[in-house]
Image (cartoon, rainbow, N blue to C red):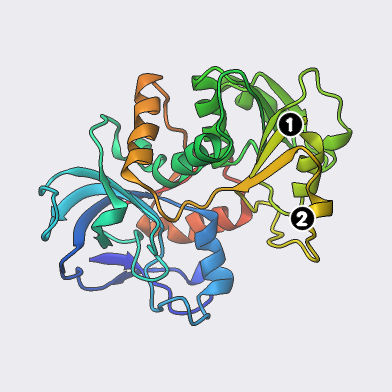
Amino acid sequence: MKAIVIDKCCKAEALKVSEIPVPKVRPGWVLVKVHAAGLNHSEALLRMFEADNDYINTPIVPGIECVGEIADPSDCDFRKGDKVIALMGGMGRSFNGSYAEYALLPYTHVFKVDYDYDWVSLAAVPETYYTAYGSLFECLQLSASDTLLVRGATSSVGQAAIQLAKAIGAKVIAACRREESFEKLEAIGADHCTIDNGELSRRIFKAKPNKILELIGPKTLQDSLLTVSRPGYVCSTGVLGNVYTIQHFDPIKFIPNGVFLTGFYSNYPSKKAINGMFELIGKKHIQPLYAKVFTMDEIVEAHTLLEQGGAGGKIILKM
């Protein structure tokens, strides 16, 4: 089968299509014929910085999510031909992931879906919309009466969060760096847009957000904690600011009184959460968003764009 294989840290230009054997099925794992896969920032980080570390099982096929159909259900309760999504659980890091025509995956991280999306549209959903869904509803406990600020709103997760939050009737403020993005963000549901200069806590809002989805990460986290109303809730989910830790973190001084800080980790999706996500998407007729589609032969172009972050949304790799 065709696959993209990484054996060490490398530049995007070094990526190429290789021929490797189709994985052999084993108990507790299912063989998925991959039709498309969403690309993620973590896969660029893997290629650039992580592949040389011992905890990455190189040579490795990257890719933390995919959509496709069951090619061999093994001893699991799937049927051949079932339409499925798969995400996380070690995909593309501990074992081969989705940049391939077939992927052997643990059945616990494979979920049957019945929604009638084309493969590319469906590929925009798994990791992106699950991350947004989990952040909003598991962590922030978002409701229709809330005012949500999405920080990093032009990112794929940010755009998905806007769609999901508006679907339940919440008021949404979108924060981004460029005014030219406002029209797009308003078109997908943002009630108000604001420029993010890194100091939103100095901004005067008509309606102060009581909940913030923080996708920039540690770089702007303290400012988000100071921006939210009291009581207020901040969920730190992304690291788009490329700052990954906070030095000398003192939670007593760092987190203001009456503000609650949480974080979303998407590595263990549950069937209940995946079903809830698709129920909301289907009931509210949410159209999954993506920006660019590439083939496996265009992997260099795809990863260059992924690394540079200029896609303006989800990048899809179509097999």
Label 2 Cα crowd, 10 Å radius (few <14 / some 14-19 / many 20+): few
Q: Amino acid at mark 2?
A: Pro
Between discs 1 and 2, the one toward the N terminus: 1
Please state which of residues 317 and 200 is positioned toward the viewer in this rendering.
200
Q: Residue furthest right?
A: 202
Which residue, given by chain and number where applicable, does mark 2 sit on? 251
**Secondary structure of residue under mark 2:** helix
Q: How many marks?
A: 2
* Residue in view at x 21 percent, y 62 percent: 29
The N terminus sits in image quarter = bottom left
Residue 280 image label: none
Question: Is residue 266 positioned above or below 140 on the image?
Answer: below
**Secondary structure of residue under mark 1:** loop
In the image, taking residue 120 as reference, residue 21 lies left or right, namely left
Q: Residue 188, percent across and down?
A: 55, 23
Question: Is residue 59 positioned above or below 120 on the image?
Answer: below
Please state which of residues 55 and 242 is positioned toward the viewer in this rendering.
55
Question: Is residue 99 positioned above or below 93 on the image?
Answer: above
* Residue in view at x 13 percent, y 45 percent: 81
Q: Amino acid at mark 1?
A: Pro
Q: Quadrant of residue 158?
A: top right
Q: Residue 187, percent across and down?
A: 58, 20
* Residue in view at x 37 percent, y 62 percent: 91
Which residue, given by chain and number where applicable, does mark 1 sit on? 231
In this view of the protein, can residue 11 be seen by the observer? no
Q: Residue 261, percent across and down?
A: 68, 45
* Residue in view at x 47 percent, y 51 percent: 266
Q: Residue 306, percent across and down?
A: 55, 54
Label 1 Cα crowd, 10 Å radius (few <14 / some 14-19 / many 20+): few
Q: Are the residues at dot 1 and dot 2 in contact (C-beta closer than 8 Å)?
A: no
Please state which of residues 298 and 83 is positioned toward the viewer in this rendering.
83
